[in-house]
Amino acid sequence: MTPVEALARGERLRPGARVAVVAPSGPVPEERLAAGLDILRGWGLEPVVAPHVLDSHPTLDHLAGADRARARDLTEAWCDPTVSAVLCARGGFGAQRMVDLVDWAAIRAAGPKAFVGYSDVTALHEALAVRAGFGGLHGPMVAAGTFLSDPATQESLRVTLFEPESVRTLAPETARTLVPGRARGVTLGGCASLLAADLGTPQGRPSARGGLLFLEDVGEEPYRLDRILTQLLRSGWLDGVAGIGLGSWEECGPYEEVRAVLDDRLGGLGVPVVEEMGFGHSPTARTVPLGVPAVLDADTGALTLDVPALR
């Protein structure tokens, strides 16, 4: 099976750049969106809100508008030549419902751009990789509480977007060795439950072979995390993975219980594993580039990118 390959990177942002904000998943609180837009404007960006960002689904309260409308917003934002980046407003649920309605041929033809999101947006990161060959940024969303309240989270995204060469190494002080060693591969991953849910879908990534896999999740109790990771193992999706970086497990129960599951399910793979790398749903969430060749050193808790996240 072909190993995970490096993906095309978008261009870094410059002051005055227009950035589109889309809502591919859950409904977006208007006041939070307004606060997030103000932060982007403070960076010298010109945010453009997609037409259906503040929509509500007529019958399903957990969705931000109809599936086709959310998919159209993403397609049109990406294909707008005046837009330099596409940022998600929030996660929740819904990306899987609209992912097959996106015009991936048009997106592929438009070329790579910076794309930011995490959680439910994992489904779109995977689709961008498989259907367009583009990398993305596992980073905070415009109307998410962490982005609005935590300066360190904001700064991690800002420097990645504007000065990507300055963050070629991610080495959070919280990182700890779960399994020692050093591995080279291409970064991929996101929300563990979304990766498991992608298995068996027509355009799902066939394997994490040769990749540096980054995993996190929220609201999954230890026994459910066990089930998610076991499914990834039983499917063969983790066969040949080069190394694993673990982020936050917010609202997943006592960390010692979560850690026991992670160690039990991932420790036997025989690859380097680093825990508590400070990305995901945590109060401070670092931005992790996806689709970039890198080295993961589990002994020092550092991820070093071969190239900047953006060109």
Image: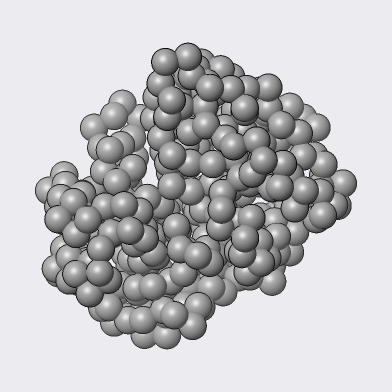
The image shows residue 82, relative to residue 271, as above or below, that is: above
In the image, is 202 to the left or to the right of 89?
A: left
Front-most of 168 and 51? Answer: 51
How far across and how far down the image is residue 146, in percent?
A: 56, 57
Quadrant of the snapshot with the C terminus:
bottom right
How far across and how far down the image is residue 50, in percent?
A: 68, 27
How far across and how far down the image is residue 216, in percent?
A: 36, 58
The image shows residue 18, relative to residue 292, as above or below, that is: above
Q: Residue at x 77, y 30 (%)?
A: 81
The image shows residue 122, relative to residue 309, as above or below, that is: above
For residue 269, say whether it is visible. no
Q: For residue 123, what is the image quadrant? A: top left
Q: Residue at x 75, y 59 (%)?
A: 162
Q: Residue at x 52, y 31 (%)?
A: 27
Q: Residue at x 65, y 35 (%)?
A: 30
Front-most of 68 and 93? Answer: 93
In the image, is 257 to the left or to the right of 218?
A: left
Front-most of 178 and 208? Answer: 178
Coloration of the structure image: one colour
How far across and how far down the image is residue 222, in percent?
A: 19, 59
For residue 151, say whether it is visible. yes
| Extreme residue toward the front, this view | 31
Tally the numbered discs. Answer: 0
In the image, is 29 to the left or to the right of 48?
A: left
